[in-house]
Image (cartoon, grey):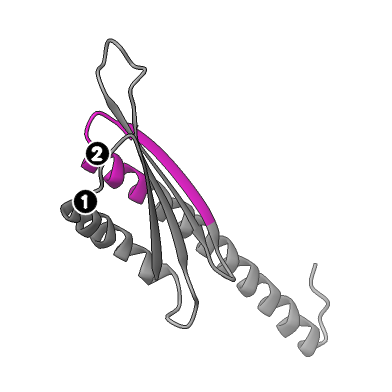
Amino acid sequence: MNIQTKATNIEITPATTDYLEKRMGAIKKFISSEETILVEVDLGKVSNRHRTGDVFRVSVRLSSPHHDAQAEAESVDLYTAIDEVKDELLAELRTSKEKRQHFIRRSGQKIKNIIKGIIGR
């Protein structure tokens, strides 16, 4: 997994990088080990929020030959925003995996019916 990090109005510390890599490691269970994964992360501080103070924005885009997903979150704390974006990204990957499995099972059932001599609907 290749993680490319971009920062806007914020300094990226080694602790932030380690935390981000640890959280994005949860993606590996949805993607096979042979695939090349590119994860583009954009960390930023939105400073035009006068009443709430500084707000951190995290945007993640995942690209691989079989998967494309993106998620975005904003929070008062950078680490909370990273957690929220990870949860959103995992939910999107889970949904696409379920859709793919459903399609494969449905197709397999139709082929089975054709082989038996019964044409499925």
In this rendering, the count of numbered labels is 2
Which residue is under mark 2? 78
- Magenta residues, start to end: 69-87
The answer to which of 80 and 8 lies nearer the viewer is: 8
Helix, strand or loop status at disc 1:
helix
Q: Quadrant of residue 44?
A: top left
Q: Amino acid at mark 2?
A: Leu
Residue 71 counted in the magenta span: yes
Identify the residue at horizontal 26%, vertical 16% (top origin): 52
Residue 33 is situated, as x and y percent measured from the top left of the image, at: 42, 81
Q: Amino acid at mark 1?
A: Thr
Identify the residue at horizontal 27%, vertical 46% (top origin): 83
Label 2 neighbour load within 10 Å: few <14, some 14-19, many 20+ = some
Residue 20 is situated, as x and y percent measured from the top left of the image, at: 27, 55
Give me the disc on residue 16.
1
Q: Does residue 113 appear to the left or right of 65 in the view shown?
A: right
Q: Quadrant of residue 4?
A: bottom left
Identify the residue at horizontal 74%, vertical 76% (top origin): 110
